[in-house]
Amino acid sequence: MHEMSLAESVLQIIEESARTQNFQRVRTVVLEIGALAAVEPDAMRFCFDAVTHGSIAEGARLEILDKPGEGWCVDCNKTVLLCERFGLCPECGGARVEITGGNEMRVKDLEVE
Amino acid sequence: MCTTCGCGGNDTLINGMAVSRRNLNRPSNRNGDAPSAGRLLFRPHHHHDPAPAAAAIRRVQVERNILAKNDALAADNRAFFAGHNILALNLVSSPGSGKTTLLVRTIESLKGRVAMAVIEGDQQTDNDAERIRATGVHATQINTGKGCHLDAEMVGHALDDLPPLDGGVLFIENVGNLVCPAAFDLGEAAKVVVLSVTEGEDKPLKYPDMFRAAQLLLLNKCDLLPHLSFDIELAESHARRVNPDIRIIRLSATSGEGMNDWVAWLDAQRTTITKRT
């Protein structure tokens, strides 16, 4: 995935929030990234540091909250945990699993001053 | 980061001209120069003045999707296409799958009957746009610089450059990359993924997001099958495993086999678009 573009979008969201919420510095940025969102947390951190350099979020701590992958197994008729996109159902081994959670890619909140 | 494809630059060019990216309108505290992610990465480190006395710290709820801006611009593009009855298709594949040759052949099949235009996405050069222009069809070249995919904003800029295309087809040839373009909606009616039989049968399993996002899989270069060990049934079953609804057409842009099925698919999609209005 494209963490550099995502990091730039995160910075935009922060800068827009700074205008509407009236703050000058960002101490912490909390992201919610689903296990199935195909985002590498280490790559995200690296890109975030690069992109925020010289901005109001320079030096901010990046907190990444994992959200587990979840799917609905049509054959088991229940929600199961998924470790990878398009993975098989961990209980019946079937492929008919619709992803129901773990796709998240959100800026959750900020600690600002 | 896409360390394999080196993505991340903002030095986007459209037909060789720089475009101002709305997302670069950052506050003036960035040392006064226009930011470019490529340069930011290598900007020398500098030390800051001691921090002023701590101001009050508070928490701000944001709760916003990181891709929200791209999605909003994609919705603008989609509204433009709907307003002009344009079928917009986002063609994605690995580099070298034969997308441009396929487009040239497709243009020859539809020419005189359907209005067409092409947006070409590549990191560098306008070679592909030149190949399209040689057919007499308009092509706008987007050079993404270090970027590894097209996004909705680049396509929105390129739309300003389009000739009238009401009721026609816009082919958007994305940067050759099976990873990054999957997440970026351009406003297209459908993604069409091109997989050539000179690649591996397991590409759909290795890059499931792209095959999941596509409505149609074109298995290209099928004229070469007698010379290869490529198991086409296996490739199709892999594609259906990640996307049970995907439509698959076997073709060869060089020999012309299967091109009729692809043209019939395009006509069916165009009919759907026209009926909507």
Image (cartoon, coloured by chain):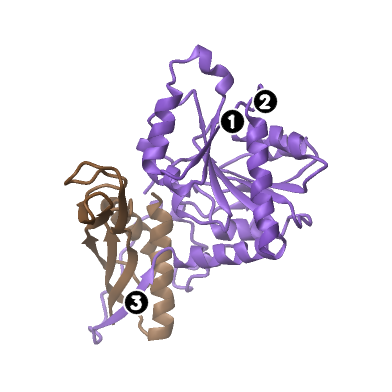
Chain colours: A brown, B purple
Viewed as shown, does residue B132 lie left or right of B27?
right
Image coordinates of residue B53 in percent, x first then y, are: 23, 84
Type of amino acid at the residue the image marks with label 3: Val
Rendered view: A106 above or below A73: below
Viewer can see residue B126: no
Residue at screen point 64% across, 60% down = B157
In this view, the residue in front, B271 or B5, is: B271
Q: Residues within 10 Å of mark 3 (few under 14, many from 20)?
A: some
Q: Which residue is mark 3?
A: B62
Which residue: 27% across, 56% down?
Answer: A72
Across and down, in percent, residue A51 comes to: 39, 60
First in sequence, mark 2 or 3: give its number.
Answer: 3
Q: Which mark is residue B256?
A: 2
* Whether label 1 touches label 2, CB < 8 Å: no
Q: Chain of mark 2?
A: B
Q: Which residue is mark 1?
A: B98
